[in-house]
Amino acid sequence: MSGFREHKVVFAGPVGAGKTTAIRAISEVVPVSTEAYASDQVAEQKVTTTVAMDYGELTLSRTEVLRLYGTPGQERFAHMWEMLCRGALGVIYLIDNSRPDPIGDLQFYLARFAPYTGGLAAVVGVSRLGQGAGPTIQDYHARIGRPRELPIMSADIRRGGDVLMLIDTLMLSIEYPPTALGK
Amino acid sequence: MPTTRKDFSISLLAMQDKDSLVLRSLMQFMSDNLGMRLRFENSERSDLLFIDLESAAGAERWHRLQGAGLFCIACATLPPEGLDPARWLAKPFRGRAVRDLLEALQHPASTPVPTLHTLIPARGAEPLDAPSPRGAEDGFAQLQAMQGKSRLSLEGPRLPLLFLDFVSGMAHLPTVEPGEFDAMVDHWTLEGTRTSAGEMPLHYLDHGTRVPLERLLWHFSTYHSRGRLLADLPVQGAYGLNRWPDFGSLPFSPEQRRMAAMMVAAPCSIERLMERCRLGREEVVASINAARLCHWLEVAPVQSALRSAASGGLLRETLSLIRSRLGLAS
Ligand SMILES: Nc1nc2c(ncn2[C@@H]2O[C@H](COP(=O)(O)OP(=O)(O)OP(=O)(O)O)[C@@H](O)[C@H]2O)c(=O)[nH]1
Ligand SMILES: [Mg+2]
């Protein structure tokens, strides 16, 4: 079929950050998810974990579809990250602020995805920000050091509205890339 | 016939400074919402005596004043055994408990008390009236005074005691329940507020709630700016942002998000932001002022404003298709 176009948004981030939850919140099809009972160290955090990927989609028109992919959080699936990122509109990193070093988590994923995401738009959603005394959004910007290129938003992933906000932000950062003047 | 009482004199007895500061500011704020007038004094003859039972002096006073026909309220972590629960206020002090107590005082016995919704309407339900234009008295002066500060306390008749820390990007306030802050913040205004430089009240370290500073500053700016730019901002300037705001903590519409994205990409004139985002001047100016207070604003001469290097036609179309599919205005 000619003229069929598809667009991809990739969700990435550590185990339990909410990737599966985010895709379930907005997908129009029953999302495909390859959950398995968690083994080893993951089991201490949650009962199931995604072992291949999450998939959801939104029909945009008769000839266009938006595909939502969730990458598995465990590093042993890193080989899939490149494939999922190829041709994507952008990447939404989800970070769980209640983990011991959430900014370190973000730095890790940004560095690991960098070879596949050069030039792609990216947005960070930080969940569980209200709980405990984890870092603030300001702390994230201070340590990552790219406050104009990388939007970092607090988000409750369980709420569909917050997931839409992250996608909207991703699209805005595609539409209005930072100019050299602004640097 | 149920009587409604509005005026009370109050004394806080045998209480540490940090606790009485929190309790006073909570009571002042809540009483304002309830239309009550509280007068604080230091006397055993006040209408209401709040006594801290967790100090030796407080316990002694409590026993001495019992039976003297006074209205004493015990402040303690746990309800004292045998005491009418209506005479107990839990420590650490929290907004909801203080409000419940004041409500009960105002409407004795079985009078139905107003619900949370009548006291603190949900955002959007019942906007505050714009402040009457009284020049410096309308709170805009206080907004001006916040510029360029790194830490600041705010104390006023229509606010709890707030400590703003521009370095961490957080504001500190007395403990409120999760979700309560969002319902309250839109009712806080700066009229009559004293701003002072200084340190965070120590008790906010263990008895406080911290919230994103921009949520407060955007609210104050939206309420008090009324189309006026802060004094040293040029009307003919181009305005940019040096970082993305946290849309997760701001009640932004898709149009306001677009405005912020344009400003992050390149400085823009007020007119261009109004036109591209279909926003009124007041909304644009309020955001520029708020960004200034957050230390996020960049000002450039207007002729250097770039047409935002927005992406090409096909991609644009796709983005607007995705937006409309997701129900986000474009
Ligand atoms: N409090 C809070 N809980 C959340 C949030 N997002 C997700 N959760 C919860 O966190 C748990 C884990 O979420 P998942 O969506 O399975 O995480 P994941 O990123 O898919 O994890 P893996 O597939 O194991 O890599 C679920 O129980 C969610 O309800 C959030 O923003 N706030
Ligand atoms: Mg998952």
Image: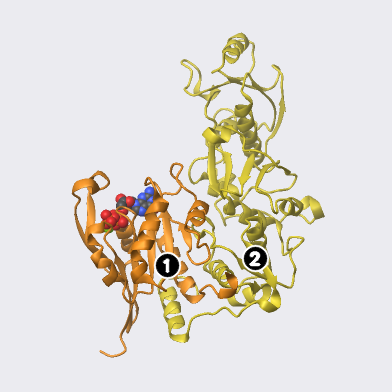
Chain colours: A orange, B yellow
Pointers 2 and 1 within a single chain = no
Do tag 2 and tag 1 residues touch (Cβ < 8 Å)?
no
Q: CA distance from mark 2 to mark 1?
A: 23 Å
B24 to B137, vertically: above or below: above
Find the residue positioned furthest to the right: B135
The tag on residue B79 is: none
A135 to B254, vertically: above or below: above
Toward the viewer: A22 or A101? Answer: A101
Where is residue A29, by image quadrant?
Answer: bottom left
Task: Measuring from the top left, give residue B134's x and y in whole percent.
Answer: 81, 54
Q: Is residue B2 visible?
A: no
SS for callout 2:
strand
Toward the viewer: B303 or A146? Answer: A146
The crowding category of the residue bearing disc 2, from other C-alpha atoms within 10 Å (few below 14, some 14 to 19, many at least 20), is: many
Toward the viewer: B24 or A4? Answer: A4
Mark 1 C-beta closer than 8 Å to ligand 1? no
Q: Quadrant of the N terminus of chain A?
A: bottom left
The tag on residue B298 is: 2
Task: Measuring from the top left, give residue A119's x and y in whole percent.
Answer: 42, 74
Which chain does the residue under circle 1 lie in? A
Task: Measuring from the top left, give residue A93's x and y in whole percent.
Answer: 38, 61
Find the residue positioned furthest to the bottom: A2
Identity, as a three-letter code, of the amino acid under mark 1: Ala
Identity, as a three-letter code, of the amino acid under mark 2: Glu
Q: Is residue B293 left or right of residue A75?
A: right
Numbered circles on residues, count: 2
Picture quadrant of ligand 2: bottom left
Task: Measuring from the top left, give residue B210's x and y in whole percent.
Answer: 53, 43
Measuring 42% from the left and 58% from the top, which residue is drawn there?
A: A125
The tag on residue A122 is: 1
